[in-house]
Amino acid sequence: MSKINEVFEAVEKGKVKLVPGIVQAAIDAGDDPQEILNEGMIKAMDSVGAKFSTGEIFVPEMLIAARAMKGGVDVLKPHLAAGAAGAAGKVIIGTVAGDLHDIGKNLVAMMIESAGFEVIDLGVDVPKEKFIEAVEANPDTKIVACSALLTTTMPSLKETVAAINEASFRSNVKVMVGGAPITQEFADEIGADAYTVDAASAAKKAKELAA
């Protein structure tokens, strides 16, 4: 009997300590590793994201679920085809120059990773050149996600997006922006492809953009 439902429930409820054992049990029971990942874990994180968006759960619960999934992925990795855990594509993420905030960015990175992407996290205070270099070093990148958490670093976000928009690879990537002071209007004005209000919507949007 398939144990994928048990994996789903354990990840959704954030049972960090139990998930690795349940994932191992599902593998031992003959469940397909790819299905355990997609139907068990990624679907559970979709559900967590939906609950977060409706205010049913909050950031701590979402973080715990993401951590539970990470533990499951570690058990699953050796059983997956190479690259399957990042099968949705590569996302480069970072907080723009002059901005040292990383909690929101880290949450977005975890949620995007939970949605099946391989995430390259450039950290905080990232100059625009570094975003460009990262994409050039990873030509298979699908999305560049930049965040600014202060009104004073919004110009820096604008410059970063402008630099990406002028790069030769621009037609191959989508640019996502976010952060407390950012609005849809500002995202449109600076030429970004997408803006999302929170980490759960960012993961959902990343899937749409990469499809």
Image: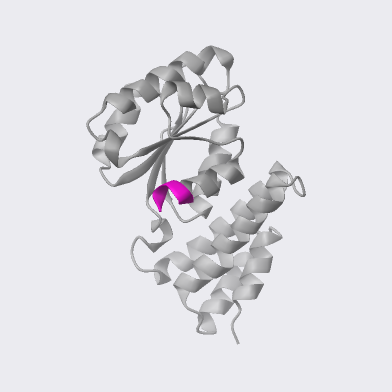
Q: How is the image coloured?
A: one colour
Query: Relative to 174, does residue 84 appear above or below in the rendering?
Result: below
Q: How far from the left and from the top, in percent, is residue 195?
A: 52, 34
Q: Residue furthest top?
A: 152
Residue 22 lies in magenta, yes or no?
no
Q: Residue furthest bottom?
A: 1
Q: In the drawing, does residue 92 fall left or right of residue 19?
A: left
Is residue 148 in view? no
User: Residue at (54%, 84%) from the top-left corner?
Assistant: 29
User: Residue at (43%, 34%) from the top-left corner?
Assistant: 193
Query: Relative to 7, does residue 190 appear above or below in the rendering?
Result: above
Q: In the drawing, does residue 183 fall left or right of residue 130?
A: right
Start-end of magenta stretch = 207-211
Quadrant in which residue 144 is drawn: top left
Q: Residue furthest left?
A: 168
Given residues 122 and 158, the one toward you in this image is: 158
Quadrant in which residue 68 is drawn: bottom right
Q: How far from the left and from the top, in percent, is residue 15?
A: 69, 61
Is residue 119 in view? yes
Q: In the drawing, does residue 142 fall left or right of residue 20?
A: left
